[in-house]
Amino acid sequence: MQEGVFTFEEATRLGLTGNDLTALVRSGQVTRLRHRAYVLSDVYAAASPDAQYRLRVHAVLRSRPPRPRGLPDRASHHSALALHGISFFKAPRDVVVVESQSGPQAVRGGMRLLSQSDADTYRYGDVRLVGAEAACVQVAARDGFEAGVCAMDSALHLGKCTIEGLAAAVELVPAARRRRVRAAVEAADARSESIGESRTRIILLDAGFAVIPQFEVREGRTLLGRVDFLVDGCVVVEFDGLMKYEGIEGKVAIGADKDREKRIRRLGYEFVRIVWRELDDPVSIARHVAEAKRDAQRRSVLAVR
């Protein structure tokens, strides 16, 4: 029920001592995530990076001292996003952000304490966190436009929030940062299915291209496939995640994608494929897409002749 996470106090209630916990950590059976916060090592090792961070947030919140009076501590920013199951980009995974009556404080021991905001409180098991809309706008305010759009795209795609809810949540952030946050809300799109797709769309739009996400390519009434983006009506842009082509299933996917690409190209579209490492060079991406657009237009002219 606790995902394998527990606190020093919970362990001692079951009869373990501090020496017992130290021995379990040294033997590799238990991983210490922070002072008085632990997780079973086999659970942690089997988890994805996103799930590992969620376990860290869960364990740290459980280890926070109870507040007999006033508001209880709760996760916020990207730490709340992790508990909501929402993807995020750029924010540090070695820091847990907690709203507390004892905040604000600088990062200490992998935790950043902030003052309590006016956001509503939600629950993840028996720990508390801010809502998805509040967490998204907090990320946009602190980590910037791109990080905000990525978080909002994921939240919208998963049905965790609405554009209207995000727009209302903008009032939760400092006035000086609301313009940036509103721009992120306006740019958010539920059709992006991954952080990579969100970042790709931002780059394409910033370069001045007209972009249609999740475009269905048809030959007559036959659906050839749904592509990540159609750019300026003639270039198909696909973001290829690293996991997509791993293992035996990945080899099958490569063959299917090549066949689909060949059929789509016959309709006159050009293809540009982008991988994660290329997202740090938006100028190069814009150049490749512009070149592909010229090739598509050239082919169209030749076809007419």
Image (cartoon, rainbow, N blue to C red):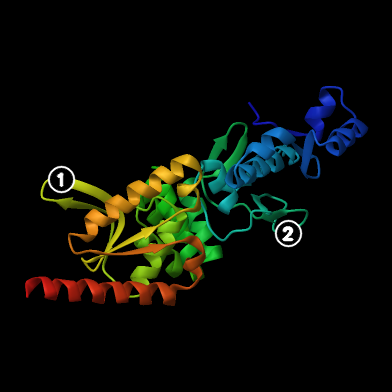
| Residue 98 falls left or right of residue 211 | right
Identify the residue at horizontal 81%, vertical 32% (top origin). Answer: 9
Considering the image in quadrants, where does the C terminus appear? bottom left
Q: Quadrant of residue 23?
A: top right
* Image quadrant where one finds the N terminus: top right
Residue at 22% across, 48% down:
224
Q: Residue furthest top?
A: 14
Mark nearest the camera among 2 and 1 is 1
Q: Looking at the image, which is closer to me, 302 or 171?
A: 302
Residue 83, compared with residue 164, is above or below; it is above
Residue 204 falls in image quadrant: bottom left
Residue 267 position within the rendered picture, expressed as x and y whole percent measured from the top left:
17, 60
Q: Residue at x 34, y 50 (%)?
A: 257
Q: Residue at x 44, y 45 (%)?
A: 251
- Badge 1 crowding class, 10 Å Cα cut-off, few under 14, some 14 to 19, many 20 or more, is few
User: Disc 2 marks which amino acid?
Assistant: Val
Question: Please, what secondary structure does the residue beneath circle 2 have?
Answer: loop
According to the picture, the residue beneath numbered tag 2 turns out to be 107
Q: What residue sits right under mark 1 in the picture?
A: 222
Q: How far apart are marks 2 and 1 (CA)?
A: 56 Å
Name the secondary structure under disc 1. strand
Q: Is residue 298 above or below residue 75?
A: below
In the rendered image, the residue lying farthest to the right is: 19
The amino acid on which the numbered mark 1 sits, given as a three-letter code, is Thr
**Label annotation for residue 23:** none
- Closer to the camera, 305 or 101? 305
**Number of other residues with Cα within 10 Å of mark 2, as a class: few under 14, some 14 to 19, many 20 or more:** few
Residue 183's x, y, as percent?
39, 66
